[in-house]
């Protein structure tokens, strides 16, 4: 093997590292539409005996949530677990509930006004999903692992890639 071949052999696993870095930069700067910035979500929530419509709400972390809360039959309430937000609404009146979704997870909202026999079953679910930095982080971890494994695979068995401290392999 001449010096040039040696040089190529020595450098090429390092291209994997470079590729990994380029990919990582790509992932960090790739614009993801719609979920890049926290949004303001306008949600119409209607309470009636004995359900909420909609009974499930999906939002992302960081979103500003504005719920227009109505009741179509009797007086109902709204209590959001985990956020401790409470409201009460009379039929024909719209009550605005505003908050920022700072916690991810699933949170139940329930009627907080005793409105009849099946009142305890009047439950809905707010799903606060992680926003996109989470997915970027996942992508970065995958790229990092892939890069590392590929690098290790390519450099496997080439002793000069693993200089032993102190002792020279003579
Ligand atoms: Cu109710």
Image: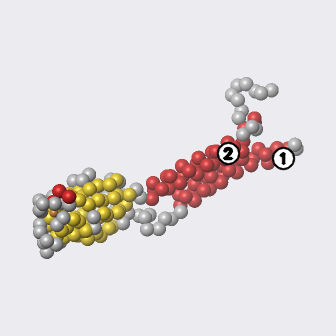
Q: Quadrant of the N terminus?
A: top right
- Which picture quadrant has residue 151? top right
Q: In which quarter of the image is ligand 1?
A: bottom left
- Where does residue 165 sit, x and y in percent of width and height? 69, 28
Q: Which of marks 1 and 2 is nearer the N terminus?
A: 1
| One can see residue 124 in this view | yes
Answer yes or no: do the residues labelled 1 and 2 have beta carbons within 8 Å? no
Q: Is mark 2 on a helix, strand or loop?
A: helix
Residue at 43 percent of width and 68 percent of height: 34
- The residue drawn where x is 84% and y is 47% is 4
- Mark 1, Cα crowd under 10 Å, few <14 / some 14-19 / many 20+, is few
The numbered dot on residue 135 is none
Image quarter for residue 40?
bottom left
Query: Circle 2 is placed at which residue position?
Result: 151
- Of residue 79 and residue 3, the one placed in the foreground of this image is 79
Image quarter of the C terminus: top right
Q: In the figure, is residue 79 to the left or right of 1?
A: left
Q: Residue 19 vs residue 139: left or right?
A: right
Q: Position of residue 62 (x, y in %)?
A: 35, 59
Picture quadrant of residue 86: bottom left
2 above or below 85? above
In front: 39, or 105?
105
On screen, residue 8 versus residue 27, left or right, reads right
Image location of residue 83, percent across then percent down? 25, 54
Image position, residue 160 (x, y; %) = 75, 36
Please rate how many residues cluster around mark 2, counting C-alpha atoms within 10 Å: few if below 14, some from 14 to 19, many from 20. some
Determine if residue 95 is in view: no
Which label belongs to residue 5?
1
């Amino acid at each position: 093997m001449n010096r040039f071949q040696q040089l190529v052999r020595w450098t090429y696993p390092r291209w994997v590292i470079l590729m990994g870095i380029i990919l990582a930069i790509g992932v960090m700067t790739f614009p993801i539409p719609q979920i890049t910035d926290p949004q303001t979500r306008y949600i119409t929530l209607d309470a009636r005996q004995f359900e909420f419509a909609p009974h499930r709400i999906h939002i992302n972390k960081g979103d500003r949530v504005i719920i227009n809360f109505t009741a179509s039959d009797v007086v109902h309430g709204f209590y959001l677990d985990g956020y401790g937000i409470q409201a009460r609404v009379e039929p024909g009146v719209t009550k605005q509930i505003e908050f920022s979704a700072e916690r991810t997870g699933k949170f139940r909202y329930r009627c907080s006004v005793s409105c009849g026999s099946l009142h305890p079953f009047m439950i809905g679910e707010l799903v606060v999903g992680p926003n996109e930095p989470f997915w970027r982080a996942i992508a970065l971890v995958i790229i990092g692992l892939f890069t590392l494994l590929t690098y290790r695979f390519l450099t496997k068995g080439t002793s000069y890639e693993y200089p032993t401290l102190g002792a020279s392999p003579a």
